Image: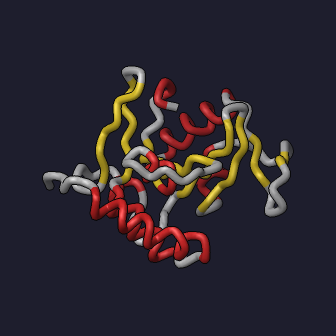
Amino acid sequence: MKRRGVEFVVIGAYAAVTQGWSEPTSDIDITPDRHVRNLQRLADALREMEAQVLTADGDADASWPIDDQHLRLRETTFLTTRFGDLDVVLNPAATEGYPDLARPSESFLLVADGIEIRVANLERVIASKRASDTPKDRDALPRLEALLQRLPRREQ
């Protein structure tokens, strides 16, 4: 995605993993910039990754088009790719989407193999999980908050 110039922030459990979370996660969640050109680049990257939309029962649906218009239609698009599962979340709970999450006070740059990837900070992950209020997120909150207490404070 970065090779295609897609602007996004990694959120959710995988963002927590980059900050010391050791519990397993089955997918990566991202929040992309919603500008049309960025969503077009994202759709191009997803097609290159052989992405297919996942239905409510978890089956891949090859009939659903992977394009910027369809990505914009859903707050969350659940996908499977040749690399694994990916959730595209336009407006995570307790955020105003990409512009909010991309601010340096809300995220940080992680460099992996020479590629810079913006990742939501743990405080943001916790706030979003608290606001989404799903059973899975409520269950994880005490452990995420304990991890946050162990982390050194970031400069604002």
Q: Nearer the viewer, residue 107 or 77?
A: 107
Q: Position of residue 46 (x, y in %)?
A: 64, 36
Residue at image location 41% in from the left, 71% down from the top: 94
Q: How is the image coloured?
A: secondary structure
Q: Nearer the viewer, residue 100 or 41?
A: 100
Reply above or below: 55 against 4.
below
46 shown above or below 9: above
Q: In terms of depth relative to the viewer, which is nearer, 49 or 66?
A: 49
* Residue 68 visible somewhere in the drawing: yes
Q: Position of residue 124 (x, y in %)?
A: 36, 62
- In-image side of 56 versus 35 (left or right): right
Of 45 and 118, the residue lying toward us: 118
Return the x and y of residue 19 as percentages of the image width and height: 37, 48
Res 135 → quadrant: bottom right
Q: What residue sits 63% from the left and 46% below the top?
A: 86
Q: How many marks?
A: 0
Q: Does residue 34 appear in the picture of this structure?
A: no
Where residue 128 appears, as percent x and y from the top left, is: 44, 68
Residue occupying image coordinates x 41% and y 21%:
113
As drawn, the residue found furthest toward the left would be 155
Q: Locate residue 28 relative to residue 16 in the image: left or right.
A: right
Residue located at (33% from left, 54% from top)? 121
Asked if 90 appears above or below 46 in the picture, the reply is below
Q: Quadrant of the C terminus?
A: bottom left
